[in-house]
Image (tube, rainbow, N blue to C red):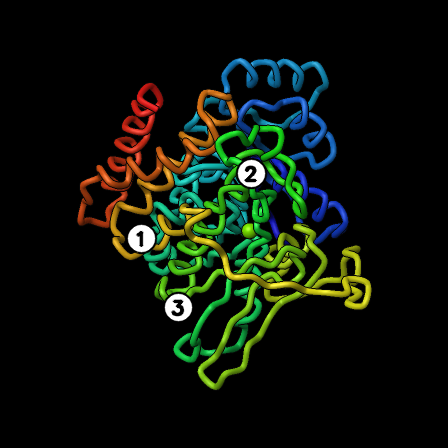
Amino acid sequence: MKRIIILGSSGSIGRQTLDVISKMRGYIKVEGLAVNSNVEVLKSQIKKFKPAMVSVSNFEAAENLKKWCILNNIKTIVYSGNESLEKIVTLSIVDMVLVSIVGAIGLKSVVAAIKTKKNIAIANKESIVGAGYYIVNLACKMGVSILPVDSELSAIFQCCNGEKKSQIKRIILTASGGPFYKYSKDFSKITVEQTLNHPTWKMGKKITVDSATLMNKGLEAIEVSILFGIPINKIEIVIHPQSIVHSLVEYIDGSVIAQLSNPDMKLPIQYALTYPERMSSNIKSLSLWKVEKLEFYKPDFNKFPCLKFAYFAANKGYTMPAVMNAANEVAVEAFLNKRIKFTDIVKIVEKTMKNHEILKNMSLNSFYQADLWARQYAEKLFEKI
Ligand code: MG
């Protein structure tokens, strides 16, 4: 039986992971769960999966949960505060930590998990974008694997199975295009409600906004480049509105291998959990004649400048991707809180990147320094816009 910890268990990926696990009957034991503050969801998860320990970052919410555990005679140990994430990762004896926390804040627990020799199932692209080279080197040194959970990265991972990395010519990363790919009206009038209405994937708020600006695809391109060791200029993005082809890999002989399925996050989640095995699932079988057509378009980098920023950041390297990511996190949060317009996200990210002086160092410290600088700089821009 595999033993697992899920960080971010109340979020979209966390809940779907537990759903997948509950259908695997006896294959995986959930040893630990972590949430920020949503203890109501966590309570039902504790009842069902009986983890040995949980972490709740918010102190008040953690106190509430501790009382509930005593009242209900539940033996699960509750840790609280931000450090508690690292605590449950370090203390537990598990095979895998699934990281589905949103944002670069997930980095500390990723590092703690790798240092204590746990395999990582990664659904936290922000930490890979910001400090990916450090993480990959550390994982290599500690002999642990990093398995992608994201659908496109899982597709690429599957298309590379048994192949030689040196024989990859190009990676073709697909993007649904989000809700505004064909939108021809004024982008500055786009509302939060319109943005959260994604055509093919049901996801958390931050990633849904990133899908609308296409920053999500920019982040993924950088993530692919780091995790698969492929230069960013060999990664091509293609808009594929049906989200059936999850990505493709072209080899030097001209063969292009793709991975297809109906859009359902439970498939890449399950593959990360069962790798290198496959297991039967309830995922709806793909019927190509029902899908009828698969469309592919060239993305418009001028309409969606976040794509430009991502290639620029990856080519600059060092701390630039971390800065792009941090500025974007701050701007998306402000947009969701209706402090800024949709088009301000691009402006804030661009200005922050322009004013960043790269730290030519790959240490964890320079990542934190650049990340903090970008957040503070981006925050100051809100008043000026
Ligand atoms: Mg994705």
Q: Mark 3 and mark 1: span between their CA atoms?
A: 14 Å
Tell me the amino acid under the disc marked 3.
Lys
Q: Nearer the viewer, residue 283 or 38?
A: 283
Give the x, y percent position of residue 55: 53, 28
Q: Nearer the viewer, residue 277 or 30?
A: 277
Counting residues from the N terminus, which is met first, the one under dot 2 or under dot 3? Answer: 2
Q: What residue did someone put label 3 on?
A: 234
The residue at 50%/20% (across/down) is 58
167 displayed left or right of 177: left
Q: What residue did someone put label 1 on?
A: 312
Vertical order, 184 against 225 (above or below)? above
Give the x, y percent position of residue 298: 51, 61
Nearer to us: label 2 or label 3: 2
The residue at 18%/41% (across/down) is 357
Counting residues from the N terminus, which is met first, the one under dot 3 or under dot 1? Answer: 3
Q: Which mark is residue 2?
A: none
Callout 2: SS: loop
Q: What residue did someone put label 2 on?
A: 185
